[in-house]
Amino acid sequence: MLSRFGFAHAAAAAIIAAALGLTGAIGPAAAEGPEVANFSLPNGLEVVVIPDHRTPVVTHMVWYKVGSADETPGKSGLAHFLEHLMFKGTAKNPEGRFSQILATIGGQENAFTTSDYTAYFQRIAKEYLPLVMEFEADRMTGLVLTDANVLPERDVVLEEFNMRVANSPEARIGEQVSAALYLNHPYGRPVIGWRQEIEKLNREDALAFYRRFYTPNNAVLVIAGDVTGAEVKALAEKTYGQVARVAELGPRMRPQEPIPVAVRQLTMADGRVAQPSLQRSYLVPSASTGKPGESEALDILSQVLGAGETSRLYRALVVDQHLATSAGGWYQGTSLDETRFGVFASPLPGVTFAAIESAIDAVIAQVADGGVIPAEIERAKTRLIADAVYAEDNQATMARWYGAALTSGGSVEKVTSWSTRVRAVTAQAVQDAARTWLDKRRSVTGYLVKELPGNQEKRS
Amino acid sequence: MNLSARLGLRRALSGALVVMGVLAAAPLPAAATTIERIVSPSGIVAWLVREPSVPLIALDFAFKGGATQDPVDKAGVATMTAALLDEGAGEIDSKSFHERVEAKAIEISFTATRDYMAGSLRTLTDNQDEAFDLLRLSLTAPRFDTEDVERIRDQIMSGLRRANQSPNELASVRWWATAFAGHPYGRSPRGTLESVPAITAADLRAFTHNVFARDTLKIGIVGNIDAATAGKLIDRVFAGLPAKGKLVPVANAIPQGLGQRIAIDLDVPQSVLMIGGAGILRKDPDFMPSFVLNHVLGGSAFSSRLYKEVREARGLAYSVYSAVMPLDYAALFVSGTATRSDRANQTLEVMEAEIRKLADAGPTEDELTKAKSFLTGSYALRFDTSTKIAEQLVQIQLEDLGIDYIDKRNSLVEAVTLADVKRVAKRLLNANMLITVVGKPQPLPAKGG
């Protein structure tokens, strides 16, 4: 494994949360946390400042409210491709200059794309904050692209696709499950894109997409570290404040899902599979689409059902019934539109998917019918709230939580009130969430196998 | 000395930046962070950084002797031990142990590397007593109950079955097995599908008795805690351990099989390449020049020679890297990438050409300046969370660099000269390498072709 050496830099420009299978809730921040500043510039750029004065370093991030779900059909992968191309320079700062400067000052940089947002960041000694703000503001609307740098970068993205998806049976079936779950919403498309569409993306596509979405009124600046709100405000006015709005954007309206009615299953065979696995996704409300308290209840439910060795799925399938080597669940609450609740398991040799699945169904039914016990719900709350405290130790984590929330339909208030809202979740709400949302008709189950069985076993 | 001064953040701006004229050299606030060497009542040494502003404690520690201490025919003992230490200890069974840890959101984890058994603890300050008690039990009285051992064995076997189909894993495992045939480094720390089934609870127990001892223990602790309290907590965990461990001696080694290219056939669209050779030991005066040199070749994310030639100019790969890896008993230089199979040979040629070019001519003065500037400027980023600081405190002790290392480190980087890196380039890179290629590449050209 390359990363074993700890030097396998994900070289440029792209961590795709979805392709990585990042699942758990992106979410908490403490109500008792730092004094967060939040304001907007006249050109519409929203700014969030999270002070942390322990070490003289700063995490500087610009988040755009655009992701793969905002792409035009037929151009899948464009949001992510543009993210790569954002490192190709502007009229004022030709290709390589920004990265050279960061390489010289000892700054770290990267970028990432998901279905809802695209973000760029630098981690630097605080004295260089004005410098990176100037560069980042310049590429907000000043990008220049040529075929000479666009086409090799498309090859890089295709190699990224090979690395993350084509070489990984687990990632491939993940794509299939998402595509089957979302009948109408573009969340069904992989963030990295479908290969045959990535291959055809070009300079014109990228620039058109850029001009449509990259404008200060569609961005959020998040700065965490050894700065104050007042310092950032003055610097932001001098840099980002000078960038003119280049596009007006209406509300982010994507095609929404119909009420799901069919239990769906799919099987994918790959000769490289040495350990079969099962994964199921349910269509559920997100922090943005749910009624008050609904998303928080799903967060608790995912902890009780699926987080770690005390979770019900792990206890039942791995420990008590000896059916699986791993089992768990997750919920991705931070999402602009309806999101996913997932469960998974890897069977022990000789155990059928039918046995695994009926055990999973029984665990879910226990919660839906019998509810959760107080100790479980307390453990889950303690864990989620402690995460918020632990997060305060890490300025980069704090910056990510705010940025993801603010580009996925959330607000600063929603982030700071997170712990309070988690504390308020009742056992009844958790049971209701299981009964309402973990209905098999809302789900797709994927089976990853080495080869297709001659006789398809019955599975539901 | 405060941390910002120690990290050299007040250094002068480089010429290039001044010319651009967009910089304000803001004076830095004093981030008053100091490393204290503390001695617990029972005589255990630890390094402490007090951090009053976050209500948590981060403790990192390590014992010498990781996977190198696995019995010859039982690779995987250290890894399996690490996976089982939180599966029940003392009177507390696995289920209760996990429940108690999770009830207070305590994080306890253990890792086996080739050279060390490392552990870390993170807890809210309010829960420190419970956290340190549970850590003590896991280190001094792990249960290794049959049911838990078998469950963890199943999980490791499942991971090994997956790894046997992973091009990255296969490239790495074969590289190490070839370079260190007959040496403990040649065995995979995860073990194999053959070795893991043979491991018994007695093996795991013997491993903990031999390795968990005070004589090789290194501790770093960061948090809202004073020296006296820290000393007591440390004793609570570690004072009951034996004074001396019983480690099997490990011979020094140099990588073998250099000049070989090994192809492993696997039906994947993208081939994985790993290139490696002899490196420079941490105590060798040439280590720091080798570290700076590597940054120029493939250590930096967006500006290294390999990044520019393999990724940016030719679009051959998404990720390409090189690294220097000083271990306790050997030192390595490694490099690698993953690339479309029909261009794997081209990629390998480009990488070998870059390595050769750097060996012959060394970096330019400008590259050296920028590399040093990056490495000194980014050092502070290793210290911006309590967890990272605790890791650094242990790492510096393991490498025996001295408690003033953080003060000195950037000046050691600055002191590297062009003559140093040119000399070291020949020593490090002008040598045969062992190459493993996993995938379906077109036939490899004859060596040297």
Image: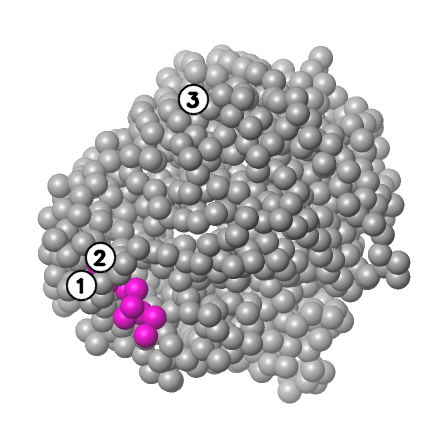
Q: Are marks 3 and 1 on the same chain?
A: yes
Chain designation of label 2: A
Location of mark 1 (residue): A245
The amino acid type, in three-letter code, at marker 3 is Ala
In which quadrant is the N terminus of chain A drawn? bottom right
- Dot label at residue A217: 2
Q: Quadrant of residue A321?
A: top right
Disc 2 on helix, strand or loop? helix
Real-space CA distance between mark 3 and mark 1, rounded to the nearest whole angstrom: 41 Å
**Picture residue at 75% right of the left edge, 21% below the top:** B143
Disc 1 on helix, strand or loop? loop
A449 lies above or below B268: above
How many residues crowd around disc 2 within 10 Å: few (fewer than 14), some, or many (20 or more)? Answer: many
Q: Nearer the viewer, residue B69 or A213?
A: A213
Real-space CA distance between mark 2 and mark 3, rounded to the nearest whole angstrom: 35 Å
Q: Nearer the viewer, residue B385 or A60?
A: A60
Q: Is residue B204 visible?
A: no
Query: Residue A211 in magenta?
Result: yes
Earlier-in-chain disc, 2 versus 3: 2
**Picture residue at 35% right of the left edge, 40% below the top:** A398
The magenta segment is A208-216
Query: Residue B205 in magenta?
Result: no
Disc 3 on helix, strand or loop? loop
Earlier-in-chain disc, 2 versus 1: 2
Percent across and percent down for residue B180 are 72, 57
The amino acid type, in three-letter code, at marker 1 is Arg
Location of mark 3 (residue): A424
